[in-house]
Image (cartoon, grey):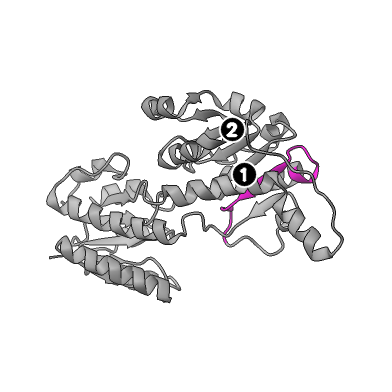
Amino acid sequence: MYKFVSFFGDRSPLFEELNEKARAYARTKGIDFVWVPQKPYDVEDVIAQLNDTDAAMIDVEPYDENIFGRMNDRCKLLVRFGVGFDKVNLPDATAHGLAIARTTGANKTGVAEMALMQMLAAGRQVMLNRKTVASGVWEKNIGTELIGKKVGILGFGNIGITLARLLQGFDCELVAYDTCPNEAAASALGVRFTDLEEIITTCDAISIHLPYNAETHHLFDAAVFDRMKSSAILVCTARGNIIDEDALYSALKEGRIAGAGLDVYAQEPLGADSPLIGLDNIVLTPHVASQTHESLWNTYKKGVDIVADFFAGSALERGDLLNPEYAGNPRQ
């Protein structure tokens, strides 16, 4: 029986329940699932656990040569709980023959729902209206509707496709950008692929679902905000550093764009002194887009399925295995 250690989650009733459910499900796959939560994160304990397991589920902490170089050859696979992998050094993992996977698509509904909620909340000025109610001095703050608007989706993978599906009832013009366009999904949902420039300059709402890398670092900077419509809303549930937060603050403060919604930040947690917190035209949530009961369970289940398929020699789903070249190195 293969051993699968999970480092994700904290000691709370919800995660106790989810991990017991994952343990029972793993047994049906011939896998021994063990939960070793890392709150707070202890790199020495992580290394010790990795040296006594066949696979592990990892969270958002950095995984690189500092860890891989101290591992023995038992552990063959690390599975990222979620889809973002910018903290995992893939070349280092590959050099050690260590496979890195992610649970693609498992949290797509939770994240897409959050993106849609932030678009709607920013458009209807929910933060300002909440303050108005608390003040006791009621004012009628005039919002905007999403119905019939032009919406740009940056990154048309599982989450972007799910967002397009949720938007079907809003009679929006949907345009998308992706370096590997899924033409079949776009056609089925009435989405037209275009370039970044059209999305930036013509869309009423833009939702970011791109990976974070050197090319997307501060993709949205002062120059981009200057080219956006003054009525536009920008939402990001991907990675914080895709947006230059100082430039976003200025654009919101000066009314160069109408509103924004962020679930991710350059530094997390967002500092209590961040000027973004003082704005009324931005919706801020603490990196919880994927934190629904349904998405969490889907991610645990897919993690177990990936481990089972990996050790059975079955091909993993498209986009799950991040470094297929690992197989040419000595760990195997």
Cβ atoms at labels 2 and 1 below 8 Å apart: yes
Query: Element at badge 1?
Result: helix
Q: Amino acid at mark 2?
A: Val
Of residues 197 and 91, which is closer to you in this image? 197
Image height of 11 relative to 127, above or below? below
Image height of 44 relative to 214, above or below? below
Residue carrying label 1 = 119
Say whether residue 52 is left or right of residue 254: left
Q: Residue at x 65, y 49 (%)?
A: 121
User: Residue 297 magenta-drawn?
Assistant: no
Q: Amino acid at mark 1?
A: Met
Q: CA distance from mark 2 to mark 1?
A: 10 Å
Main secondary structure along the magenta-highlighted residues? loop
Q: Position of residue 281 (x, y in %)?
A: 73, 49
Q: Earlier in the sequence, mark 2 or mark 1?
A: 1
Residue carrying label 2 = 151
Q: Position of residue 116 (x, y in %)?
A: 56, 45
Q: Position of residue 18 (x, y in %)?
A: 35, 68
Write the start and end of the magenta stretch as one range: 252-268
Looking at this rendering, what residue extends furthest in the front direction?
Answer: 169
Is residue 53 among what the camera can see?
Answer: no
Image height of 247 relative to 46, above or below? above
Q: Position of residue 100 (x, y in %)?
A: 30, 50
Q: Residue at x 48, y 49 (%)?
A: 111
Query: Element at badge 2?
Result: strand
